[in-house]
Amino acid sequence: MMQNVAVAVVTVGLLLAGVLTSVVHLAGGMLVHEGSVLLVISNGMRLLRH
């Protein structure tokens, strides 16, 4: 469970910093965020099997 929290917080932090400094465009950031959400969901489903 801590893996999921860490992935989510780190991803959001990096994307926020990237958007605020204009390194990441908003649409690209949203795409990366959705990918990280799918990663967290799949990891949670994997953990439920154990």
Image (cartoon, helix red, strand yellow):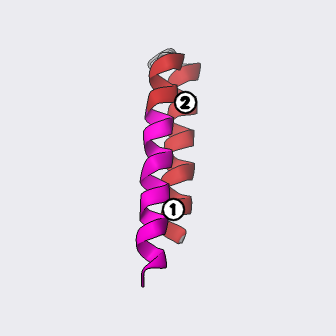
Rendering quarter of residue 42: bottom left
Residue 40 colored in magenta in the image: yes
Residue 4 rendering spot, x and y as whole percentages: 51, 62
Element marked by disc 1: helix
| Image position of 34 with respect to 38: above or below | above
The residue closer to the viewer here, 31 or 9, is: 31
Decide: marks 1, 2 in contact (CB < 8 A)? no
| Image position of 19 with respect to 3: above or below | above
Segment colored magenta: 32-50
Residue 34 rendering spot, x and y as whole percentages: 49, 37
Question: Given the image, on which type of amino acid does mark 2 rest?
Answer: Ala
Query: Which residue is rendered at x = 44% and y = 33% of the image?
Result: 32
Q: How many marks?
A: 2
- At label 1, counting other C-alpha atoms closer than 10 Å, the crowd grade (few under 14, some 14-19, many 20 or more) is some
Helix, strand or loop for the magenta stretch, by majority: helix
Query: Which residue is rendered at x = 54% and y = 22% of the image?
Result: 19
Question: Given the image, on which type of amino acid does mark 1 rest?
Answer: Asn
Which of marks 2 and 1 precedes in the sequence?
Answer: 1
| Image position of 32 with respect to 47: above or below | above
Q: Which residue is mark 2?
A: 17
Query: Which residue is rendered at x = 59% and y = 21% of the image?
Result: 20
Residue 4 colored in magenta in the image: no
Q: Determine the CA span between mark 1 and mark 2.
A: 20 Å
- At label 2, counting other C-alpha atoms closer than 10 Å, the crowd grade (few under 14, some 14-19, many 20 or more) is few
Q: Quadrant of the C terminus?
A: bottom left
Residue 6 rendering spot, x and y as whole percentages: 52, 59
Q: Which residue is mark 1?
A: 4
